[in-house]
Image (tube, rainbow, N blue to C red):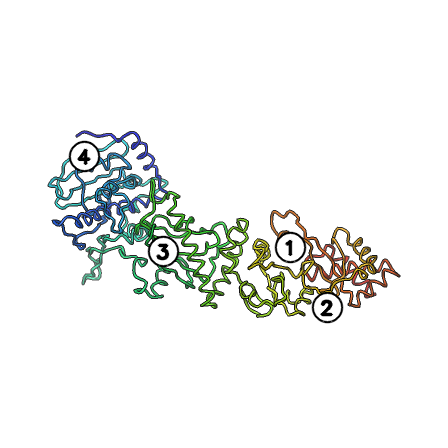
Amino acid sequence: METKQFQAESKRLLEMMINSIYSQREVFLRELISNSSDAIDKIYYKALTDDSLTFDKESYYIKVVPDKGNRTLTIKDTGIGMTKEELENNLGIIAKSGSLAFKKEQEIKDGHDIIGQFGVGFYAAFMVADVVTVISKALGSEQAYKWESHGAEGYTITPCEKEAVGTDIILKIKENTEDESFDEYLEEYRLKSIIKKYSDFIRYPIKMDAAIKEPKEDAENENIGSTEEQTINSMVPIWRKNKSELTDEDYEKFYQEKHYGFDKPVKHIHINVDGTIRYNAILYLPENIPFDYYSKEYEKGLELYSNGVLIMNKCGDLLPDYFSFVKGMVDSEDLSLNISREMLQHDRQLKLIAKNISKKIRNELQSLMKNEREKYELFYKSFGRQLKYGVYSDFGTHKEMLQDLLLFYSSKEKKLASLDEYISRMKDDQKYIYYAAGESHERIEKLPQTELLADKGYEILYFTEDIDEFAIKMLMTYKEKEFKSVSSGDLGIENEDEKVSESEEKEHKELFSSMKEILSGKVTDVRISKRLKSHPVCLTADGEVTIEMEKVLSSMPDNQDVKANKVLEINSNHEVFQVLKNALENDKEKLYLYTNLLYNQALLIEGLPISDPVEFTNDICKVMV
C-alpha cells in the first residue's frame, strides 16, 4: 500500500495545524461537524435539480461517537460522501475546498451557504488526533474508500466496505501529556458542551448515545446501564424565527441561556437584513453595568456566527467602543473567512454590518428615550457615562451620532433632561446653554456663580461626572447654541445696568491691584462681580480650562499640572467690600489677611484644597481676636 505525500505547501500548513493555528483545540469538533453539515447540504442541493433524488430530512443527521476503550472519536454523517478522486483532491491538497467548487457548479442561490467541506478546517483534527481515518461512500457509487493519515508524513487511500452513503471520520485521540489532557475529548459531557457552544444551530440533528440508568430490584447491585440516542443541538436558532412568533420571555430566556448577563435586559433588538449583505442579529441593552466594565479585563464584542456556526465569542469589530455595553449575536452567510473560521478577513461586509448595527442601536436608544423614558433613564444610569466618553473620544468624531442620547440634570425640571428638551425651553433672549459643574446637585445649587442666572429664570444643566465638561467642550455647540459655564468670565447676559462701568473700575483699581499682588501666582485677576447677589466672593475662570476640569486633570496619574486661569470676583454690594476698602486705606496687614481669607473661602466653595490649612485657621483666629 503506497503512502502518498502531501504537497510541500500543504505539508508545511499541516505542521502548523498540528501545532495549533487555532486559539483553542476544541474547535476541531466544530470544524468536522460543519463539514458534515455541508455534506448533507450537498444532497439537498442536488435534490432541488435532480428529480430522481428525494430529500427526507428525517433521514439526515450527524452522529458523534466517543469510544474510551479504543481511544477513538467518530463523527458520522449521512451526507453526499466522496469518491476516491474527491478524497484525493479534497484531502490530499490542503485548503482546496470541495464545497466551493460544488457551489459554483450548481449555481444555486437559495439563501444557503456552504462554509467549506474539507477545506483547511478538516486538518484541525490533527490537533487532537495521532491518526485520522476517513471512510466515505459517495452518492451513486458502489465502492467505498478509506483515507488515512498519521500527519505530515502523508496519507493512504484504499478500497473498503461501507453499507450506507456518507462519511465517517475516526480520530485516534492523542495520549495525555504533562501539559495537556486529551481525555476530555472522549468524555460525553465535554463533547456535548462543545457541540452546544459552537454547533447548537447546525440545521441537522447532531446525535449522541447517552447512558441511562435502570434501577434493578436488588438495591445492593449497581444500576445496569443502557443507552438512548439523544439530539444535542437546538437546530433552529431564535434569530431565524419570525418576530411575531417570539415573546419578550423568549428573548429574555435566550439572554440568560447565552450568559450575556445576570440582569434582565432593558431592551432587545431583533434585526433581519436581506440586502446586499444578509445577516440576522439579536442585540440587548443591559440594565446593570458589569462589575469589570471600566477595567482592562472587560472585553467588548458580539458573538459572531457564520450560517449558524459560532466563529467568535467576542467580535469587537462589530461594536464601536461607545456602544461596548451592547450584548448579543450576529449571524451572516456572507462573511469571508480565511485560514480558520475564527480568523475573519476585515473586509467591507464586516464593516457594513458594524455600521448598520451602530445606527440601529442609536435609533433604538432614541426611541426608548422618547417612548419609554423610565426604561431609558434606568439604562442611562448605568451606561450614560460611556456615551459621554464616546462624544469625547477620537476628537469628537462620533458626537453627531451620540449628542441626542445625552441626559443631564436640570435646575428647572429637577430631573434628567436631553439637550433637545433644554433647547425647547430656552428663553427668547437666551444666547447660551448654561451648565454648572460640581460634585453633587446639592453642591451646585449652592454655588454663588448660579445666582444671576437663577434670578433671570435661566435653566442650568448640572454636570456631576468628571467626563461631563470634557464631552461638552468637544461638542462645542448643540443646534447652533454654544455651551457656557456659570463660572465663565463672561456669561453674556449682563445688560447695561449690570455691567461694570469704567468709572467704577477706575475707582477700585488700586484695591484690586493690591489684592492681585497679594494673590500673585494664585489668580490671574481680581475684579468686581455682577453675577453675585448675596455671596461676597467666588472664583471664575478665563479660558477653555474650567476649575472643574482642573480638578479632574489634577487627579489623573499623568497629571501635567494643567491649571485654570482663576479670577477672584468680589461682590461690590456686600458689606465685605466696604471692609476691604477700609483696610486698603487704613491697615495693609488686614487687607492681606482679608484677601487670603476670601480667596481660601472661594477655594472651599469650589471644593478645591487649601494650600495651607494651618495658615487659614490662624487667619480665622486673628479675625476673631
Task: Kindly identify which numbered label has been placed on residue 157.
Answer: 4
At 24% from the left edge and 39% from the top edge, which residue is drawn?
A: 132
The amino acid on which the numbered mark 3 sits, given as a three-letter code, is: Ala
At 26% from the left edge and 39% from the top edge, which residue is drawn?
A: 97
The amino acid on which the numbered mark 1 sits, given as a three-letter code, is: Lys
Q: Residue under label 1, please give it.
A: 551
Labels 1, 3: front one: 3
Of mark 1 and mark 4, the one earlier in the sequence is 4
For label 1, the SS is helix
Reply above or below: 545 against 140: below
At 23% from the left edge and 37% from the top edge, which residue is drawn?
A: 90
Q: Residue under label 2, please give it.
A: 533
Residue 453 left/right relative to 233: right
90 or 372: nearer the eye?
A: 372
Marks 3 and 4, Cα distance to the nearest angstrom? 44 Å
How crowded pointer 2 is (Cα within 10 Å; few <14, some 14-19, many 20+) is rated as some
Q: Residue under label 3, please give it.
A: 281
Q: Are marks 1 and 4 in contact (CB under 8 Å)?
A: no
